[in-house]
Amino acid sequence: MAYVGKKPADSIIQSSDIQDGIITSGKLADNSVIESKLNTNAVTTDKVNADTITNAKTEFTPGLTIKGDGSSADGKIILNCSQNTHGVSIAGPAHSSAQSYNLILPTSVGTTGQVLATNGNSSNQLSWVDAVEAKPTVANVSQTIAPATSQTFNITGTGFISIPIVEFIKSDTGAITRAGAVSFTSATALSVTATLATGAYYVRVENNDGNAGRSTNTIITASTAPTWSTASGSLGSVAGNFSGNVITVAATSDSAITYSEVSSPAILIGSGSGQTNCTLGSSSGIIATTDFGGSSTAPTLYTFTLRATDAEGQTADRVFTLQSSFGATGSGGFN
């Protein structure tokens, strides 16, 4: 075999037989140095010049894996500014979270003010959604408190942040009263102290981030409970078999009152044995009868309990008695 130049030695050419700079890139045919000809870790960092690996040489298909360091540093991508003096990184979740998932970007840029949101399932398709502020809500749980005196009560709802502002808005005038004290129990409960004038109120809760929510309905009513005007005890003596109005009982409040009997079993209302055979006007308080005592022929003391209830559902109970009489000692009904 003919050689150009000096005939090489019969032994394999070693790297020590080649002078530095002899084999240049121009002397290597395309694809002549393939992966199988390179030892593991043969090409080290110091053998790769800066900017040698360009964008054209980094088409990763189908994807690129950025590894962690095998100890404590998670894999991440750093996006630098044009001058490479600042950068923002996107890092993988910590090893302890044991998370593996794929996030797919939306197919459009969305609209002003929208944010990226996950659909929460295995496809992990991200989409643009309108940003929603986290406003607190106030539950429509009605309560009645005494007016013009300091009262402590609970407000329930969602999204409360320690410690919010609580205001009471009077339904008829719009006047606002701020709570004197607010104690944060949880994100769903507050203990509030306030002094409110008589009336019905909406409740508004404002978190310290500026987000606020108001009850849909008036849920706090400051109202005075009913008070009986008619003294407890005896309402007098009524002749057996009397017919007509017996007496009128009365109570007062800052709203309309209804009257009812709460004796168990009923004594005033009913015509059976041991009952007076009377009626009670629910709005007037008039006790009337067409035959007082019904079939009873002996003097009887009837004891019963009446309840006054105002429009706010507040109640006051009182015990009364009526005596039936027969013969010369009998008397008529009275008002």
Image: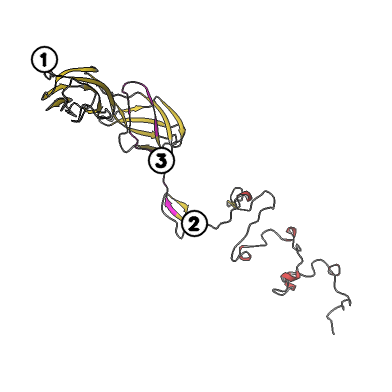
Colouring style: secondary structure
The earlier-in-sequence mark between 3 and 2 is: 2
Nearest the camera: 212 or 309?
309
Badge 1 marks a residue whose secondary structure is: helix
Residue mark closest to the camera, 2 vs 1:
1
**Farthest-out residue, top:** 329
- Residue at image mark 3: 135
Q: Is residue 159 left or right of residue 58?
A: left
Q: Which mark is residue 263?
A: none
Q: Which mark is residue 328?
A: 1
* Residue 150 covered by magenta stretch: yes
From this viewpoint, is residue 178 visible?
Answer: yes
Q: Which mark is residue 121?
A: 2
The earlier-in-sequence mark between 3 and 1 is: 3
Residue 38: give x, y in percent of width and height. Answer: 75, 68
| Looking at the image, residue 233 lies above or below residue 102 | above
**Where on the picture, by quarter, is residue 312?**
top left
Residue 3: give x, y in percent of width and height. Answer: 84, 81
Residue 176: give x, y in percent of width and height. Answer: 32, 28
Badge 3 marks a residue whose secondary structure is: loop
Residue numbers of the magenta segment: 128-155
Placement of the N terminus among the 4 image quadrants: bottom right
Q: Residues within 10 Å of mark 3 (few under 14, many from 20)?
A: some
| Looking at the image, residue 241 lies above or below residue 55 | above
**Farthest-out residue, right:** 10
The earlier-in-sequence mark between 2 and 1 is: 2
Badge 2 marks a residue whose secondary structure is: loop
For badge 2, the amino acid type reads Asn
For badge 1, the amino acid type reads Ala
Residue 237: give x, y in percent of width and height. Answer: 16, 17
